[in-house]
Image (spheres, rainbow, N blue to C red):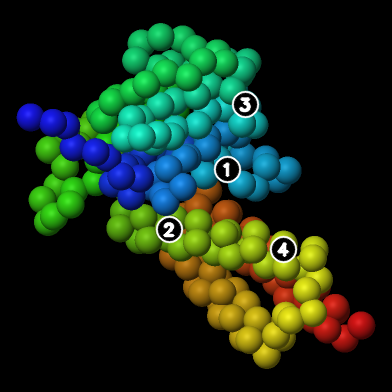
């Protein structure tokens, strides 16, 4: 029987320990998830880990022609892939495999397939603690708003003539309001991230308004 071809939206990464324990990250339409150290200069990471043992760009999980791979980016503290310490290598992995970023102190991340129906995944890791539903929702909301943040920054940098302030201003105001409400429900590091995201969006509003008045 031929094996099923995997699609990017079927794959999810679960952080099993460390400061992001219980967080889930979809592979997404691009078929790539980048992992590294949280750093203000590196805002395009999909999984940003607040740990000094992790390199700024540490590893990438990708789906290529139906096969999963992990690439270590010549890191200082290696990536543990299927029991092998790797630096600067790209190795194939399977569903259910666990990679460890900067072992032994860095987090373990499990790769698994999302259920296509109402049933839960049969190989879901029992040792991992699932996050509260509200944190799952807030994490997804933060990722979406960060993407909007980057898109708007690009628009500001390019200064296109067709920016419609009447459309952008209410949209940004709504984003900020939702982020501030979400911040009140969140805890710990997620609360900090949501507060920072709201601050960045407020700054974008100020920049756009200043450009409109110029």
Say if residue 130 shows up in the picture: no
Determine the secondary structure under disc 2.
helix
Point out which mark residue 140 bears.
2
The residue indicated by pointer 1 is 45
- Distance between the alpha carbons at the discs numbered 2 and 3: 24 Å
Tell which tag, 2 or 4, sits nearer the viewer.
4
Q: Position of residue 135 (x, y in %)?
A: 38, 56
Residue nearer the viewer, 200 or 3: 3
Residue nearer the viewer, 112 or 90: 90
At horizontal 27% and vertical 40% (from top left) the residue drawn is 6
Say if residue 68 shows up in the picture: yes
Q: Earlier in the sequence, mark 2 or mark 1?
A: 1
At horizontal 34% and vertical 15% (from top left) the residue drawn is 82
- Distance between the alpha carbons at the discs numbered 3 and 1: 12 Å
Determine the secondary structure under disc 1.
loop
- Distance between the alpha carbons at the discs numbered 4 and 1: 16 Å
Determine the secondary structure under disc 4.
helix
Determine the secondary structure under disc 3.
loop
- Distance between the alpha carbons at the discs numbered 2 and 4: 20 Å
Q: Position of residue 85 (x, y in %)?
A: 46, 10
Point out which mark residue 153 bears.
4
The residue indicated by pointer 3 is 55
Q: Is residue 102 left or right of residue 169?
A: left
Q: Position of residue 214 (x, y in %)?
A: 92, 83
Point out which mark residue 187 bears.
none
Q: Earlier in the sequence, mark 2 or mark 4?
A: 2
Q: Is residue 23 left or right of residue 97?
A: right
CB atoms at circles 4 and 3 under 8 Å apart?
A: no
Mark 3 surroundings: few (<14), some (14-19) or many (≥20) residues within 10 A: many
């Amino acid at each position: 029987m031929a094996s099923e071809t995997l699609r990017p939206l079927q794959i999810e990464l679960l952080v099993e320990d460390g400061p992001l324990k219980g967080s889930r990250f979809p592979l997404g339409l691009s078929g790539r998830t980048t992992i590294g150290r949280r750093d203000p200069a590196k805002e395009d990471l999909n999984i940003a880990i607040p740990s000094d043992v992790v390199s700024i760009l540490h590893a990438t999980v990708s789906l290529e022609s139906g096969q999963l791979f992990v690439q270590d980016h010549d890191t200082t503290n290696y990536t543990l892939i299927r029991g092998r310490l790797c630096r600067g290598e790209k190795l194939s992995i399977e569903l259910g495999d666990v990679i460890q970023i900067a072992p032994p102190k860095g987090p373990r991340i499990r790769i698994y397939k999302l259920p296509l129906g109402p049933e839960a995944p049969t190989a879901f890791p029992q040792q991992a603690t699932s996050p509260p539903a509200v944190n799952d929702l807030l994490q997804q909301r933060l990722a979406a708003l960060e993407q909007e943040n980057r898109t708007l920054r690009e628009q500001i940098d390019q200064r296109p003539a067709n920016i419609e302030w009447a459309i952008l201003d209410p949209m940004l105001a709504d984003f900020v309001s939702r982020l501030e409400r979400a911040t009140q429900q969140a805890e710990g590091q997620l609360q900090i991230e949501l507060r920072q995201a709201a601050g960045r969006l407020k700054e974008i509003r100020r920049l756009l308004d200043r450009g409109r008045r110029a």
